[in-house]
Amino acid sequence: MKCEQHTARAIAAAIKAGKARGLNEKVSVEEIAQLGLRSNDCHSNAEKFAKVRGGQVVRGWLAGPNYYIPHSIVDLNGALHEVTPVDGGLYNTCEFVAESDVPDAVWSRVPAVVWSC
């Protein structure tokens, strides 16, 4: 597991500056079925949801206690919508940090997890 120090520090600084947000709006079970949204496919899910329902895809990271996962959600009328079905417990321990709030880091799907150092 690679330690991406620069990215991890930049994300941590954004969190400390109050840029992290909770993901309170989640896609419904009906929308998951209608749109064919899949677990572990957040980037495609966000693009699909935005195309059908509207809104803007927002790239960033799910920030956990000592890790950051590249993640995509949808901003729909100012509310951040989680459009990927996952274990609800994950959202109790993570916040979302948008790429636009971390100017010193370059967002990428790879690595799948950025570990804090």
Image (cartoon, grey):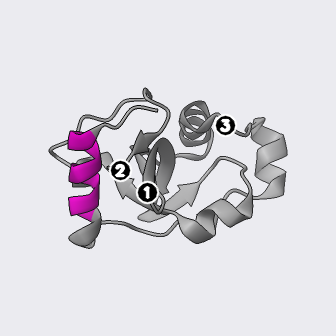
> Nearer the N terminus, badge 2 or badge 3?
3
Number of numbered labels in the structure image: 3
Task: Please tell me in which quadrant of the rendered image residue 25 appears.
Answer: bottom right
**Which region of the structure is painted magenta?**
5-14
Q: Residues within 10 Å of mark 3 (few under 14, many from 20)?
A: few
2 sits to left or right of 112: left
Rendering coords of residue 112 (x, y %): 50, 33
> In the image, what residue occupies the spot 75% across and 38% down?
35
Q: Is residue 51 above or below residue 91?
A: above
From the viewer's side, name the closer residue of 65 and 81: 65
Regarding mark 1 in the picture, which secondary structure is present there?
loop
Rendering coords of residue 52 (x, y %): 62, 39
101 sits to left or right of 94: left
Q: Which is closer to the viewer, label 2 or label 3?
A: 2
User: Label 3 belongs to which residue?
Assistant: 40
User: Label 2 belongs to which residue?
Assistant: 116
User: Label 1 belongs to which residue?
Assistant: 66
29 sits to left or right of 37: right
Q: Amino acid at mark 2?
A: Ser
Q: Amino acid at mark 1?
A: Asn
Q: Amino acid at mark 3?
A: Asn
> In the image, what residue occupies the spot 49% across and 43% down?
72
Regarding mark 3 in the picture, which secondary structure is present there?
loop
63 sits to left or right of 90: left
